[in-house]
Image (cartoon, rainbow, N blue to C red):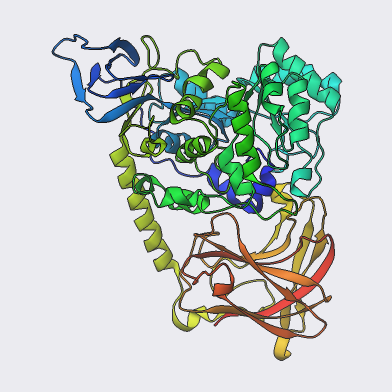
Amino acid sequence: MNSRLNSTLRVLGWMAFYFLLSAPAFFTADAKNPDSFLIRNARVFDGHKLLSQAEVWVESGKIKAVGPNLKVSSDVKVIDAAGDTLLPGFIDSHTHTWGDALKQAEIFGVTTELDMFTDVKFAQQTKALQDQGKALDQADLRSAGTLATAPGGHGTEYGIPIPTLSSPSEAQAWVDARVAEGSDYIKIVIDDASAYGGHTPTLDDATLKALIDAAHKRGKLAVVHIGTQKDARKVIDAGADGLAHLFADTAPTADFGSFVAAHHAFVVPTLSVLESIAGSGAGASLTTDPHLSPYLTTENANNLKQTFPKFSTSLSEKYAEQTVALLKAAHVPVLAGTDAPNPGTAHGVSIHRELELLVRSGMTPAEALSAATSAAAAAFHLDDRGVIAPGKRADLVLVKGDPTQDILATRDIVSVWKLGVEDDRAAYRAAVEKSKAEAAEQAKASAPSGAALDLISDFEEGQPTSKFGTGWMVSTDSIAGGKSAGEMKVVDGGANGGKHALEVTGLIDGGLPYAWSGVMFSPGKQAFVPIDLSSRKSISFFTRGDGQTYRVLIFTAAGGRIPAQQTFTAGSDWKKVTIPFTAFNGTDGHDISAILFVGGPTAGKFNFQVDEIKLE
């Protein structure tokens, strides 16, 4: 899910949302509060400043005392942290949470996630566990639950039915329903997709204002997703408490910082996802950091390497970085948020890239650390965390080195505690390594060999089956909120005198900039399980049709949720098309999880046939 046109984002996320919802958690066992402990000889960044001569005493999940030379009884465990720095647990102020995301987050030092749109039942169940003192091996969750959007607007594209709004008169009842569901704050979407070269319905100005007023009437913050600088100014002027993103469409006006400051709003820039949207994402750098990579699942590592599809408009993350500098100069609260798990991001680990980008934007390392701790807690009225002080939650991160001098030091994590309970990062790392090994074995065991790999389908049996894998199925953008339609059927008259071919027909709707409709095949025994097909170097097929240009999409494990694509033209006569695997973003075929033949993104009717689909 996202914030920033997440369908466009999640794009080509195709079925990924469903797989992520069912992603297995590595650990779900509840931990018990340990005995008291004292951390000595560490630098202590308390959320605001560095304390060079301080010790921290934790008891029963809270910080009991902070100061030099604390006197404790002999039964209190003492941790010698010489050379290390103790920080408050990080707060990621913009995520979308499901599956085992909260576990992933805590491993990388994020002890609180502020979710901006997820399944309400998931949020309710998670918070119920938290209230019972359970789930201590997962980040704490606060959530907006369902976001406020127009019918057909951003947020409606994920296949989850959500209540939308069409007029100001609906605002109070809508907000009251969210409060009843347990929303901790209200998330509003103002984004017509114009920044990305598209068009999506969005709330009108009167409904925006009514929603903000309704949220305030119930004592809730109103946080607004925007896509353009124009929208940013509009929602701040309407009384929004905070922006859920910055903009990348235009350079900021010189007065933008003072304008936001005058309205006493906060900003969550989400620089990590903005650089991915602009096409220059650097999430991949996290996958090569030796302090982080051993804890990354294959899926998360692959997602960090992705960027969003190229948009038709000119977007630049530099505009957002310039805006952060203006906000800092105007003393606007800037909060660290990643918008994980959009392409180029992942839960937990991306907070470290976000901190790096905040510093690149002109903040000092200490200011960036505050953005991920005390500033976030203050903006969202989380009075029990975000600082290291007596009476506060013992949500803590111990790192080597001094991140107030070098922000990259946050990545070298020694220990993470939630409510005084230390996370078993070693066990998690071992589980990740085991999972990777098992996946490799599964792919190897499932892969056909020898001549069995040559032919995928010739349809001579009169059915849309395949010689290996899952067979063919219809795939459309309806899974992402699109309205494209398609169907397939085996028809008489195949290539080279064959009996049959597979005909693919349908209508591409113009509502999405990445629309698709067609057919999909997975080479494994289960959909989207990556299979090693590297013994073959290309895919070939015969095609004919209405003369239009179509696409072959290939999903790989390395490519994550975004497929590589090549085009072909389906003329009136049968023609053989051969495309080397290397044409699909350089893959060698060792981790292919799905192959699709599709129409789109150009709107309109389509009709083509394929036959004798082979690997060569």
Identity of the residue furthest to the left in this view: 74
For the residue pair 438 and 263, the one nearer the viewer reads as 263
For the residue pair 576 and 415, the one nearer the viewer reads as 415
State left or right for residue 76 relative to residue 337: left
Q: Quadrant of the C terminus?
A: bottom right
**Residue at (72%, 38%) from the top-left corner?**
227
Identity of the residue furthest to the bottom in this view: 497
Q: Quadrant of the N terminus?
A: top right
State left or right for residue 135 relative to residue 596: left
Where's residue 330, x and y in %? Answer: 62, 22
Q: Is residue 283 above or below residue 100?
A: below
For the residue pair 491 and 477, the one nearer the viewer reads as 477
What is the quadrant of residue 26 in the picture? top left
Where's residue 307, x and y in %? Answer: 59, 52
Where's residue 266, x and y in %? Answer: 62, 22
Q: Is residue 436 above or below residue 207?
A: below
Res. 150 visible in picture? yes
**Residue at (41%, 27%) from the top-left corner?**
135
